[in-house]
Image (cartoon, rainbow, N blue to C red):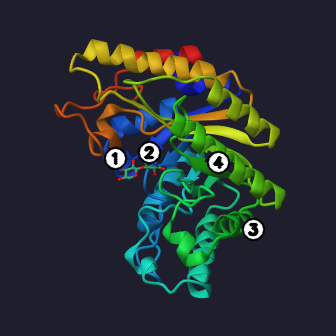
Amino acid sequence: TSSLKAAGAAHGLLVGCAVDTRALRADTAYAALVAEQASIVVAENAMKWGALHPARDTYDFEQADSLVAFAEGHRIKVRGHNLCWHRYVPEWVMRLSPGAQAKGVFVEHIERVAGRYAGRMHSWDVVNEAIEVKDGRADGMRVSPWLSLVGDDYIEVAFRAARAADPQALLTYNEYGIEGEDEASYRKRRAVLMLLRRLKARNVPVDAMGVQSHLSAGDASYGPGLRGFLKDMRELDLQVFLTEMDVNDRALPADVAVRDKAVAGVYGRYLDLVLADPAVTAVLTWGITDRYTWLNHEGSRKDQLSERALPFDVDYRGKEAFDATIDAI
Ligand code: XIL
């Protein structure tokens, strides 16, 4: 097979990537690669609060609209990311007074943004990364600005507002650090499961669980804990999307052949494990080419070499990770 989307289509699986909307316009080879490979895309940054809503009465939809137009032009589905996150909350929001005022702003943003693309989105990450078992509260809730601004029920408020604004999109709770077999992953999965059960018990409209899947080629161990979690999701009637997969290689030596083999090994083993569960209906990598990966900026390699975290290299050649992904699908 020559494309991720063709391999996925043969098995009823959407496959795609996060897109850098500026590169999409400036770099035609990159745009061609995305169009050739993806049946689903998501904006890496363009639909976040900081990008869309720079001031209280100012929205800027230019980048977000351009991605949706590109996707629709190529019959690619679009995920929205995200309507609520503790990071990249604009300064002006942090200065709102907690309670009714902040809640009004929160709901209005969700209505405006989800409403703009209503009927055209595959899914929305309504709430991103709300659980923190290390420094969070006893119930596992992260001490997010939204928790203080809107109140303890901010997650429920967000999902209900999103459903009202776009009844067709699959509403998703998205989380990281829940993939491994380590103690922290076990605790975090447990807290996420409790949260989802609470939401479902209150009839909050949640349709899917996003497992970010930022993995590492250094300490890869994925197994029964994650498999059990996928089963838990099925029992809650939730679909599962792998929303942000990549495999950092920063623990490995410089040798490219060694790194590519290790990264591909993680892609293969992880996808084999996860795709065995029918709950999983979409897989997205966080970027598609090593030319544009956030890993080169956040927690990058000490030797300053580019990470080899994605299916395609900096010159848009498919790597072993690409072959491993096709094989696993
Ligand atoms: C990252 C982007 O890739 C960066 O470009 C940006 O500077 C910070 O955000 N989890 C998420 C994503 O849910 O939104 C993050 O994206 C990566 C981690």
Q: For the residue labelled by badge 1, is the local secondary structure a helix, a strand or a loop?
A: helix
Nearer the observer: mark 1 or 3; the answer is 3
Q: Amino acid at mark 4?
A: Val
Using the numbered discs, state the Cα–Cα distance from disc 2 to disc 3 in whole angstroms. 27 Å
Q: For the residue labelled by badge 2, is the local secondary structure a helix, a strand or a loop?
A: strand
- In the picture of the structure, the residue carrying the numbered disc 1 is 23
Dot 3, how many residues are within 10 Å of its Cα: few (below 14), some (14-19), or many (20+)?
some
| Residue at x 58%, y 17% (from the top left corner) | 328
Q: Where residue 111 appears, x then y in whole percent?
A: 64, 72
Using the numbered discs, state the Cα–Cα distance from disc 1 to disc 3 in whole angstroms. 33 Å
On screen, residue 286 above or below 325 = below
* Residue found farthest to the left: 303
Using the numbered discs, state the Cα–Cα distance from disc 4 to disc 1 in whole angstroms. 34 Å
Q: Where residue 82 appears, x then y in whole percent?
A: 54, 57
Q: Quadrant of residue 81?
A: bottom right
Using the numbered discs, state the Cα–Cα distance from disc 2 to disc 1 in whole angstroms. 8 Å
Could one spot residue 319 in this view of the protein? no
Q: Amino acid at mark 3?
A: Ala
Residues under numbered marks 2 and 1 in contact, where contact means CB atoms less than 8 Å apart:
yes
Dot 4, how many residues are within 10 Å of its Cα: few (below 14), some (14-19), or many (20+)?
many
Q: Quadrant of residue 216?
A: top left
Which quadrant would the N terminus be assigned to in this image?
top right
Q: Mark 2 or mark 4: which comes first in sequence?
A: 2
On screen, residue 52 above or below 320 = below
- In the picture of the structure, the residue carrying the numbered disc 2 is 19
User: Which mark, residue 84?
Assistant: none
Left or right, 133 with respect to 93, comes to right
Dot 1, how many residues are within 10 Å of its Cα: few (below 14), some (14-19), or many (20+)?
few
Q: For the residue labelled by badge 3, is the local secondary structure a helix, a strand or a loop?
A: helix
Q: Where residue 90 appears, x then y in whole percent?
A: 41, 72
Nearer the observer: mark 2 or 3; the answer is 3
- In the picture of the structure, the residue carrying the numbered disc 4 is 192
